Amino acid sequence: MTYHAHQSLLRSVVTCVAFVSGFAIMSIELLGGRVLAPYFGSSVYVWGSIITVFMLSLSFGYLWGGRLSMRNPNPVSYALFFIVASLCCLPIILAADSIMERIFLAIEDPRYGSLLASIMLYFLPICVLGMVSPYSVRLLVLRESHSGRVAGHLYFVSTLGSALGTLATSFYFVLWFEVNTIMWGLVAALLLASAAVLATHFLSHEQNPEQLTVVETKVAEDRIAQPHPNERGTRRSA
Amino acid sequence: MKNSPTVTKIAGTGLGLSAIVLVLVAVSLFSTLSVNAEIIHEEKSLYRDIAVVQNGPRRCMVFNIHIGDRNQTCVDVDDQEKLVFSYTRMSFAGLLLNPQPRRILVAGLGGGSIPMTLTKLFPEAEIDVVEVDQAVVKVALEYFFFEENDNMEVHVADARHFVKRAGLAGEKYDYIVLDAFTGEYIPEHLLTREFLQEVHEIMTPDAVLVANTFSTSRFYDHESVTYHNVFGDFFNFKLPTSGNRIIITWLHPLPGRGQLMARAREAAEALRRFDVPVLEYPDRLSTAVDWDVSRRVLTDQFSPSNLLRDFR
């Protein structure tokens, strides 16, 4: 596999899994309302708690994902995010009732009860899914001048995934499946995403081992040896 | 800068869109209200817009008036005790099973006509009303002659949370009315088997459960299956004058017609001032299974109420 073929395959795979990650985040958020309702109701406070915790988890995920991308960015770590996220989803399926029961007993006010329950159930998986975004950008950016376009492309794909995740879950999934069945489906989708990333990586690795650490060096080479025509143009006019 | 064609075009489109929106709003308002009706108050809440609409002596609380929802609750300002809707009157058929409630729970306040009637009928009874929306409480107090008293208290809370807490505290009620509507339908988490089991928990051995639901929509089957799953046989109370169906059940075997008639005769006098024709009710309390028993039980895991509501 040539370097360019590998890059283009990696781009397609990262694009797909970024979509899956966006889809899963919003699907999980929408189901969150259903998961919490039996204990805390579906008053506006409960949705307030859920949305707050999702935003908070994503913001920390972006921060930490960005930091991790500084240290030897590689597809294996990237795949690991998806595996960890899917594992972190398991308590939502298997232990939500016992966790919420304890919180329900300990905290009388449904506002703080639902806030704590949201944190316990959703902070970890959503934080890890948030880490996917900056890391995806890092894996695909080869040249500084293209970074905005790559980031824009990834935001587009993952937010499109979020939109579809919301729509599909609220319009159809809850009509067809139980909440936990949908959650299992999302866990499977995240694991498939990680498998796709790993497969791409090891497939190219076997054929062409030296090219997998290139991303870093290639950026440097590009800048020194072959500035992009646009970059040159910009510099001249500036 | 001169107006470029694009700017003009955008402005034109904007104006056109606003005109369409205005027309739509006007049409929906016009179709919702008859000619003499007047909106005397509007209340914004976190959940919905509440309008108080007066038409002659009839004053109604309407949720989401702009999308044409049905009346939530009405009161006759000249005769405040008269129950305007037949579903409200029907909910008192629960008294045929338990004629002397002492501890009452009403989920969903609306204009408060059900709890007000109950407190007038049973001044000694302790009544808890649960309403999720503070704005509904405010409007009921200001426009619908609802009043709290020493024995009747409104709790601003989600009914699911309230019932779960009551169960935990070992509270028991002997008359429970489920009348929580969003303007569209009953909230999903108040329809599930788990919720009904929690309600079961807080019922005294002689308690009666009265649930107000709609008799149309495919959802009828799911709801019936779910109630049957938790409570076994129940009275299915429908009247041709109402699109509502009242489910009435308790923890004992259901009484026969003779006993219901005897109770109705005892209660008729007290209920007359509220316009409740209770003597007509025993013949309408049906135990016939007129729903599709193969439908799925609604659970916390599966309760797509709003999706089922409109597709038939």
Image: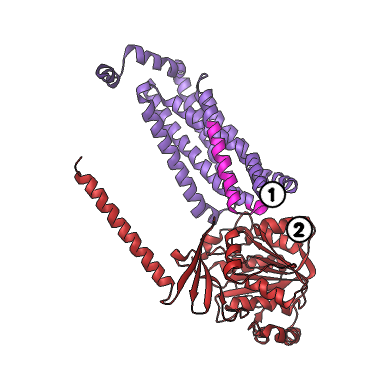
**Relative horizontal placement of residue A106, taking residue A26 as reference (left or right):** right
Which residue corresponds to the image point at 55% horizontal and 54% vertical from the top-left? A174
Please tell me in which quadrant of the rendered image residue A237 appears: top left
Magenta range is A37-61
**Relative horizontal placement of residue B200, taking residue A202 as reference (left or right):** right
Q: Colour of chain B?
A: red
Tell me, for residue A228, which label it has, or none: none
Residue B151, image x and y in percent? 75, 68
Chain ID, mark 1: A
Chain ID, mark 2: B
For the C terminus of chain A, the image quarter is: top left
Q: Colour of chain A?
A: purple
- Main secondary-structure element of the magenta-colored stretch: helix
Please tell me in which quadrant of the rendered image residue B115 appears: bottom right
Residue A120, image x and y in percent? 65, 39
Amino acid type, residue under disc 1 in the picture = Asp
SS category of the residue bearing label 1 = loop
Amino acid type, residue under disc 2 in the picture = Gly
Find out whether residue A42 is within the magenta segment. yes
B276 is higher (above) or lower (below) than A71:
below
* CA distance for labels 1 and 2: 16 Å
Residue A103 visible in the shown view: yes
Residue A226, image x and y in percent? 31, 14
Tell me, for residue A109, which label it has, or none: 1
B200 is higher (above) or lower (below) than A169:
below
**Relative horizontal placement of residue B43, taking residue B87 as reference (left or right):** left
Residue B133 visible in the shown view: no
Which residue corresponds to the image point at 37% horizontal and 25% vertical from the top-left? A5
SS category of the residue bearing label 2 = helix
Q: What residue did someone put label 2 on?
A: B167
Q: Residues within 10 Å of mark 2 (few under 14, many from 20)?
A: some
How many circles with numbers are drawn on the protein?
2
